[in-house]
């Protein structure tokens, strides 16, 4: 009985952790390096058009990553529109604090907001494309990259 209660508690705890998250998906790089030719695509569907959302780039890397930033090409295709591309400089570290993401041992996770203000999303299917745009190719010590769409709590 005690095992079942513990399992139920853990299940409830895990389900409540993602209450604001609508979508998060990352792609793992088995060689721990990201080639500029490896464009990642993430598809998801939005049905709630009343809420506002923040959009994040998600990056996981080793402490051995040599740069304090990551240049990334991000393409967004919303329902009924053509793809829009933007080149973003994602800040991963600074000289005072070091790595800005959450870390454990030599692995660091970053969720970097790529929308300046909350956005309304249309109903339908969205496609995000991510491609690294650094001079180093392949980009070493990157474990995975992805996208997160988070509903803003009212």
Image (spheres, helix red, strand yellow):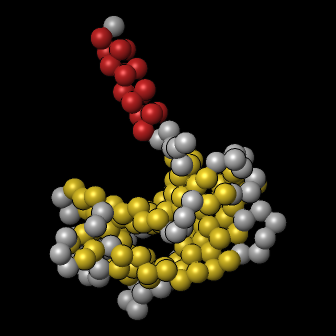
Residue 8 lies, with reference to residue 72, above or below; the image says above
The residue located at (39%, 30%) in the rendering is 13
Q: x, y percentage for residue 78? A: 72, 65
Say left or right for 25 vs 110: right
Say left or right for 145 vs 42: left
Residue 131 lies, with reference to residue 61, above or below; the image says below
Residue at the bottom extreme of this rendering: 135
Say left or right for 102 vs 46: left
The residue located at (42%, 27%) in the rendering is 11
Residue 149 lies, with reference to residue 129, above or below; the image says above
The residue located at (19%, 70%) in the rendering is 97
Say left or right for 92 vs 72: left
The residue located at (20%, 63%) in the rendering is 106
Determine if residue 3 is in view. yes
**Front one among 20 and 130:** 20
Classify the position of the N terminus by image quarter.
top left
Q: x, y percentage for residue 40? A: 56, 70
Determine if residue 146 is in view. no
Q: x, y percentage for residue 154? A: 55, 42
Q: x, y percentage for residue 46? A: 69, 51
Residue 29 lies, with reference to residue 14, above or below; the image says below
Answer with the quarter of the image where residue 99 lies. Answer: bottom left
Residue at the right extreme of this rendering: 80
């Amino acid at each position: 009985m005690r095992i079942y209660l513990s399992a139920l508690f853990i299940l409830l705890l895990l389900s409540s952790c993602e209450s604001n998250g609508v979508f998060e998906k990352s792609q793992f790089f088995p060689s721990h390096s990201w080639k500029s030719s490896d464009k990642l695509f993430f598809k998801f569907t939005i049905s709630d058009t009343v809420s506002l959302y923040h959009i994040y780039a998600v990056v996981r890397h080793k402490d051995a990553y040599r740069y304090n930033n990551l240049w990334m090409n991000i393409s967004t295709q919303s329902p009924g529109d053509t793809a829009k591309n933007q080149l973003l400089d994602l800040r991963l570290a600074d000289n005072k604090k070091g790595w800005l993401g959450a870390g454990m041992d030599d692995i660091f996770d970053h969720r970097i907001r790529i929308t300046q203000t909350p956005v309304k999303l249309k109903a339908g299917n969205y496609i995000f494309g991510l491609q690294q745009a650094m001079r180093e190719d392949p980009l070493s010590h990157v474990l995975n990259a992805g996208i997160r769409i988070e509903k803003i709590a009212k």
